[in-house]
Image (tube, rainbow, N blue to C red):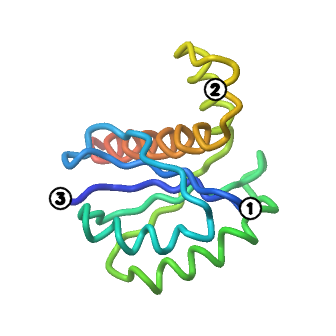
């Protein structure tokens, strides 16, 4: 079984998180400028045996796609062409930035460090991935 990777896609930068090889836990990986993401993934996915990717998909509180999908949808289309064998999942990313900030506060991260948007993006990606892992586990027990 390969690793799963999560992407918190943004217009400027993308937070990434990855599972361990046994897919037990999600950990923040790195933040990559959006323009460099595809090159990073071309190297990382085969090297680390990533078989599934979870992309945070922004929806409104009414479960409708938000305005920012116009930036994410073209990336998703390119991803599917570049990596046709990698299973792609979309995950609701509502409130992950707020959850990431709360996690940083609860973890004792200094206020000056919490201003680092790249850290928030990485933690958001790990929240997206851990939520996906948990839902997948619960669904498999039904």
Residue occupying image coordinates x 66% and y 27%: 114
Write down the residue under mark 1: 65
Mark 2–mark 3 CB contact (< 8 Å):
no
Quarter of the image for residue 4 reads bottom left
- Quadrant of the snapshot with the C terminus: top left
- Residue 113's disc is 2
What is the crowding at mark 1: few (fewer than 14 residues within 10 Å), some, or many (at least 20)? some
Q: Which of labels 3 and 1 is toward the front? A: 3
Q: In the image shown, does 64 or 53 lie closer to the viewer?
A: 53
80 w.r.t. 19: above or below? below
Residue occupying image coordinates x 26% and y 39%: 24
Q: CA distance from mark 1 to mark 2?
A: 31 Å
**x then y, percent, for residue 112:** 69, 23
12 w.r.t. 100: above or below? below
Q: In the image shown, does 60 or 18 lie closer to the viewer?
A: 18
Quarter of the image for residue 102 reads top right
């Amino acid at each position: 079984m390969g690793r799963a990777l999560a992407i918190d896609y943004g217009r400027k930068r993308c937070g990434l998180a990855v599972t361990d090889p046994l897919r037990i836990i999600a950990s923040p990986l790195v933040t990559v400028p959006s323009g460099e993401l595809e090159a990073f993934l071309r190297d990382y996915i085969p090297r680390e045996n990533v078989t599934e990717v979870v992309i945070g998909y922004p929806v409104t509180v009414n479960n409708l796609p938000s305005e920012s999908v116009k930036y994410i949808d073209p990336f998703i289309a390119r991803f599917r062409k570049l990596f046709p064998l990698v299973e792609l999942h979309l995950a609701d990313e509502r409130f992950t930035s707020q959850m990431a900030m709360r996690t940083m506060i609860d973890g004792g991260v200094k206020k000056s460090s919490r201003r680092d948007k790249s850290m928030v993006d990485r933690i958001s990606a790990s929240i997206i991935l851990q939520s996906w892992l948990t839902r997948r586990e619960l669904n498999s027990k039904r």
